[in-house]
Image (cartoon, rainbow, N blue to C red):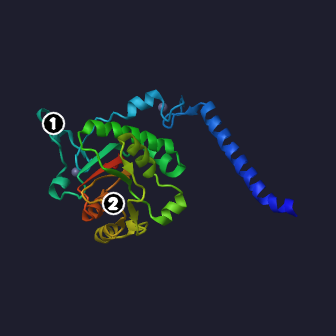
Amino acid sequence: MKLVSHLPPFSALAAARARALTTIARKALDIALPSQCALCGNVSQQLLCAGCDEQNWNEPRIRCATCAMPLAPSYVRRDREDVRLHCAACLDDPPAFNDTLALADYRAPLDTLAVELKFRARLAAGAEFARHLHAMFEDSGLPPPDVIAPVPLSRKRLVSRGYNQAWAIARPLARRLAVRADAALIVRVIHTAAQSKLDVDTRRRNVARAFVVRSDVRGKHVGVVDDVMTSGATLDALARTLKLAGARRVTNFVALRTPKD
Ligand SMILES: [Zn+2]
Ligand SMILES: [Zn+2]
């Protein structure tokens, strides 16, 4: 009888050991086997092969300093390269955030990385975005944020997906910037799934009430991270919520930006 009573903990321990060994074996296999470049399929130990890495991360676009919308070349005056440029929309009606850094447009082939990250849990894509966002930040001359936070998912979405793809970028980015990352700084209290069926005003009102700030951000510069920026309405609402809570400055770090057309 005594032996029987010892069995459950022992077998639980054995099962845990077996699981750990499987994980180690799987990791060893990952290292040993050559993998494929996420974009072109060539053999590559890195997420992207050297060729794709060089080709895809040097976008010649000039972007609005506030919202990262691509600007027409005619917008740019060659003699004033030091000046921060802004799109007409931001000049007309400035959003609540101060700056946005975006690596590239949301289009082929880099959109593949965002899809891999979001739907196939390829977290290496998050680290890759973080690496490039950090380099872009270093070149930007912007002041460093005090804290980094991901655009939160609703609880429902987090449970169904199992992870927040924005956090997969935010965490390695914060490590590179040597600032604190806080996954729970902002929470999404309204599940805004069926937004596309609503009119613009209702959508804006819903989004504005979607977030709650959970930490003291008074006087702080908050870096907000997302994988893809589309209309900017979500990031605007988030920045508005942060500023109402006392944040001094909000900088968006987004991997890819959907161009208007
Ligand atoms: Zn490649
Ligand atoms: Zn703009």
33 displayed left or right of 63: right
Q: Outermost residue, right direction?
A: 1
Q: Position of residue 16 (x, y in %)?
A: 70, 51
Q: CA distance from mark 2 to mark 1?
A: 29 Å
Tell me which residue sits at (43%, 43%) in the image.
Answer: 172
Q: Position of residue 93 (x, y in %)?
A: 17, 59
13 displayed left or right of 140: right
Label 2 element class: helix
Q: Give the quarter of the figure containing the N terminus.
A: bottom right
Residue that carries the numbered disc 2 in the rendered image: 234
* Mark 2: amino acid: Thr
**Who is closer to the viewer here, 176 or 95?**
176
Where residue 62 sits, quadrant-wise, is top left
Instruction: Residue 140: give its label.
Output: none
240 displayed left or right of 80: right
Q: Residues within 10 Å of mark 2 (few under 14, many from 20)?
A: some
Tell me which residue sits at (82%, 63%) in the image.
Answer: 5
Residue that carries the numbered disc 1 in the rendered image: 82
